[in-house]
Amino acid sequence: MNKRQRARLAVVAAAGLGLLASTAARSEQIGFYFELSGGPVSVDLSKSGFDSTLIQSALDSGFASASVTSTLDDSDQGWGVQVGYRWNRYVAAELGYVNLGEALYEAQVTLDDGVGNTAVIALDNRFQTTGFVASVLGMFPLTERFDVHARAGLFVADTRVRERAVSIEPDLPETFTSIQTRSDSKDFFGGIGAAWNINDSYSVRVEYQRFLDVGEDEDIGEEVDVDFITLSILFR
């Protein structure tokens, strides 16, 4: 092999190594990124549970009987913002904030005292939760542009429940009461998802997340699980 052939071989080898390094860096997407996410939220609340609680409360208060007509909207839209850092092809960490929307229970309760007198109460119960999240992701590249992941993390939740009741009497003015309770809790959450790395600057991610036992406080009355399906855009 003469000097000219060796020189050409060196140029080709250097170009090949450069291409491999560029491809590896692109597929790993190492470094900081910013994420915007949104999607449907579902709160694991029970309409029958609310109904039975109202009836039992009425009976405990001395009424002879009570009946309830109610609705429960346990779905809403949530959103989140996060900052992440991908350490290598397989591990990333994220910090952010999520708003998991609102669930609304509405009811009309008819109370009977057993001697011919009745009262009607209209009420609603709103469940809202927001908070900061911190999580670690295990990444599993499928191709240069596609990967799947699993997530585990901590949700620092601010959960609020607002109860409002209006007593409706045909011959009397309406009486109105409103109570808001708040719970601060630290809850676990996890998720699984997949990402399409469009180019070096943008990715699209789809993920299912589940937040466990949100609102653990005696004022809230119960712990609930929250499901969050997100569509996210990542910027690098």
Image: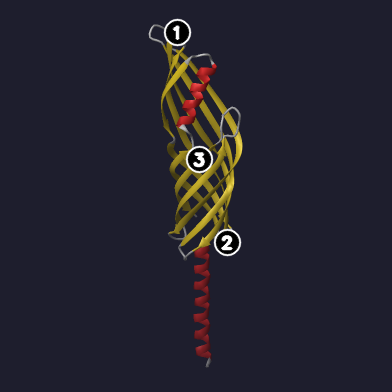
The amino acid sitting under disc 2 is: Asn
Q: Secondary structure at mark 1?
A: loop
Using the numbered discs, state the Cα–Cα distance from disc 2 to disc 3 in whole angstroms.
30 Å
103 or 60: which is nearer to us? 60
Vertical comparison of 183 with 80: above or below: above
In the displayed structure, would residue 25 be above or below residue 221?
below
| Closest to the observer, 85 or 196 | 196
Amino acid type for the residue under numbered disc 3: Val
Mark 1: few/some/many CA within 10 Å (<14, 14-19, 20+): few
Q: Earlier in the sequence, mark 1 or mark 3?
A: 1
Position in image of residue 202 (x %, y %): 45, 56
- Neighbor class of circle 2 (other Cα within 10 Å; few <14, some 14-19, many 20+) is some
Q: Please tell me whether mark 3 sits on a helix, a strand or a loop.
A: strand
Residue at 47% x, 19% y: name it: 165
Q: Closer to the N terminus: mark 2 or mark 3?
A: 2
- Where disc 2 sits, the SS reads loop
Q: Which mark is residue 115?
A: 1
Q: Looking at the picture, how far across and down is residue 44, in whole percent?
A: 49, 38
Q: Quadrant of residue 76?
A: top left
Which mark's residue is nearer the viewer, 2 or 3? 3
Which amino acid lies under the numbered mark 1 shown in the image of this protein?
Val
Marks 2 and 1 sit apart, C-alpha to C-alpha, by 74 Å
109 and 153: which is toward the camera:
109
Q: How is the image coloured?
A: secondary structure
Residue holding disc 3: 226
Measure the alpha-carbon separation of dots 1 and 3.
44 Å
| Residue tagged 2 | 88
Q: Tell me which corner region of the image, top left, top right, bottom left or bottom right, holds residue 73.
A: top left
